Structure formats: structure tokens, C-alpha cells
Amino acid sequence: MTSPPTGLRFDDALAIVRDVAVSHRLETETLALSRTHGRILAADVHAPLSLPPFDNSAMDGFALRHADLQDGETTLQLAGEQFAGRALGLAVAPGQCLRITTGAPMPAGADTVVIKENSRVDGDLVTFVAGAVPPGSNVRRAGEDVAAGELVLRAGSLLTPARVSLAASMGLASLPIVRRPTVAVFSSGDELVEPGMALAPGEIYDSNRELLMGLLRADGLEPTAWPRLPDDPKRVEIALRDAACAFDIVITCGAVSAGEKDHIPAVLAQFGQTHFWKVKMKPGMPLLFGSLDQARVLGLPGNPVSVFATYLSFGRALVDGLQGRSEARLAERAQLVAPVDKEHARREFIRARVFCDDHGVLRADPNPATGSHRLRAVADSNALIVIPDGPQRLAAGEVVEVLRYA
């Protein structure tokens, strides 16, 4: 039996996560438009009609034939009115104009709209003041935004409010989307106690569960928090195998290193498949990734900064890959406020506060805390600075990659 790869370079481990996710892409479902916000589109969408679907006025004013306008003032006969709504089948003859509102269909014969402010009405006569009005002014042409049959939304796209609105403008009542993955979340360790309960000597409160649940919810998922995993190999096995047959993703915190109480790697080795174990990153080196029953299992280290770094890097890649997301998440780069020195070869993630300065430059201010257990430094920050592989000496002002928490 071949041993799983260990101590992988960060990019190699990330490639494995993406490959496994793509090979287990989730199925497609069709949802009403109002339920597709924030989801991933499952198929290309071609426009069933043109946008605008007809020539219409861009302003309130008067529709007329541009050829009727003189160099000085021009007076035309008011032949009727067309408001936004159903077309009345009106037409403009030479010497005539038609009162029109924004969005109203252009009458036959008219090719220009003069705005209301540049006109003077006297009974059924309208006088237009002198001034250059180019032909076609204030008219929206059919299809100038979207042509019928044009590819307007691509499979794998995130359905933002603007994209859902575009689908609505074309009369689409539903869209095919990829099902969201179901996620089971475990924290582990006999030392963990629920917030609100009394602590005995040696115990700590379970903070990682809320951390992970919040990160997953921020990514649009609805995770399920499972009971804490105790330091008992049989009970760990039963809980993980139970979750793995019912969820698409199982995420654990802690118990993935090489200690006597770290039982999760053994469960994967015996009952599932380990895709890799341990990545050359700091923090987060003991990261474990595998498959168990129908689930992809992501075993995160127990320290909170490790949870942040591994979830933002690998958890999001897994979630995106399972849904077939083809658009890369926003990649941000910022200038360092202070220098950063790194002597080791691993990729490193440093807590930081990212902000835009008075000159419009994105800046990243590293937090001086270094321990991966220091949750306060995470709470005081809003992003992680990504320091590349290999020893690095980065001066203040150098540009670095940053990962926002949300």
C-alpha cells in the first residue's frame, strides 16, 4: 500500500485539493431566481431576448424626427403622448412630436428625444429652444446592452445581485445552480469546555467551533456543529464515519499531528483515503486532507491562527471546487507598513490589519504577535499576509499578497 504524501509544498497540496474537488463536483439543481443569490451557476446562460427589447427613451421629453429641427427655435405639433408601459402604436409624422417619458417605447417615425427642460409647451404646440441636438439623442436602441442569443452568464460564475438582476431583466424565473456542499464541523480534545460552563484546572473553552462555523457561514454555507470529539480512538472513529456517510465535507480542528491523542489520521488511513498529510506552511503544518465514505475530510490543526490560515487557503478551495466555481476569488495585494523577516522555507501567514490610506493605497500592518495560539491578534486583524516560500526579507513598502477574512 502506497503511503500518502507528507510535507508537501503549499502549491502542490493546494493542487491536490482542487483536483479532488473537481472530481467530486456536486450535482445540479434548479432554483427560483430569488434563491440563487450567492450560488454558483451550473450552466451557461444565453440571452432569450435583446436588452433593451425595443427602442426607448432615455429621458422625459419629446420624441421627434431630427430632420424637423431647425438651427433656431423649432415649433412642432404635439400629436399625443406615450408613457412607459404598453406601446400604443403611435407614430410621428413630419412636423409633429410626441410627449414621452423615460423607458417609454419610441413611436414610429421618431429618431430623437429632446429633453423636457429644452422645450416650451403652448397648448398643442411645442417650441424647442435653439441648441445642437445630435440625431439619436436620448434614445436607447434595442439590443445595445445585450443581443438575443448572446452568452451573458458563464457556468461557474458566482451569482452576484447584479447577475441575478440581469437574469431577471431577461425574464428568467429560475437558474441551474450547483448544490451547496453540506458541512459537518468537529472540534476535538478532552480539554475543551462549552462557553458558559465552569472551567476545571487544565481546561479551556472551545473557540474553534465558533471560528469555523462563522467562516463557513460567511462563505454562504450552512454548517452543522457536531459534538466535540473526545480523546478516544473508537469514539473518534464512530463519529467521523457517521458524519462522512451523511455530509459532503467533514472539517475537524485538532488531533491531526503526531501525538498520542491524535487519532484522526489513523481513522482515514484505516477506513478511507489520505490524499496528503502535512504541508510546508506556518502555521498549519499538520494539515490533513482525505476522503472517507462520501465526504472529503479536512483535518485542521488546533491553534486558531492555523484554523484561519488552513481554512482560507484550503477550505475555500475545496468548497469552490466542489461547486465548480470557475472565477478566482478576489486577489488583493498591499504595501507593507513594517518590514517582515522570515528565515525558514515554509510559506507563512501573518495576521495583519489591511486598510486604504489617504492616497488610495492598500496597506498591510503586520501584527507583532507570533504564536499560533494568540486569538486576540486574530480578532484585532482583518486579513493574513502571505509570505512566499523560502527565506524572505521584505522591507516596508514592498507589495505582498493578503487574504481577507471575508
Image: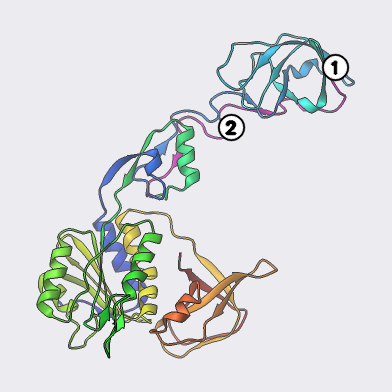
Determine whether, in the image, residue 77 is placed left or right of residue 8: right
Q: Secondary structure at mark 1?
A: strand
Q: Residue at x 62, y 79 (%)?
A: 397
The tag on residue 59 is none
- Where residue 297 appears, x then y in whole percent? 23, 68
Q: Is residue 176 in sight in this rendering?
A: yes
Placement of 17 over or under 141, stated as above or below: below
What residue range appears in magenta? 128-156
Disc 2 residue crowd, few under 14, some 14–19, many 20+, Cα 10 Å: few
Residue indicated by mark 1: 74
- Judging depth in this view, the residue of 54 and 124 nearest the camera is 124
The tag on residue 144 is 2
Amino acid of disc 2: Glu
Image quadrant where residue 182 sits: bottom left
Determine whether, in the image, residue 333 is placed left or right of residue 76: left
- Judging depth in this view, the residue of 86 and 114 nearest the camera is 86
Q: Is residue 219 magenta?
A: no
Amino acid of disc 1: Thr
Q: Residue at x 12, y 79 (%)?
A: 233
- Where residue 102 appears, x then y in whole percent? 65, 27
N-terminal of the pair, mark 2 or mark 1, is 1
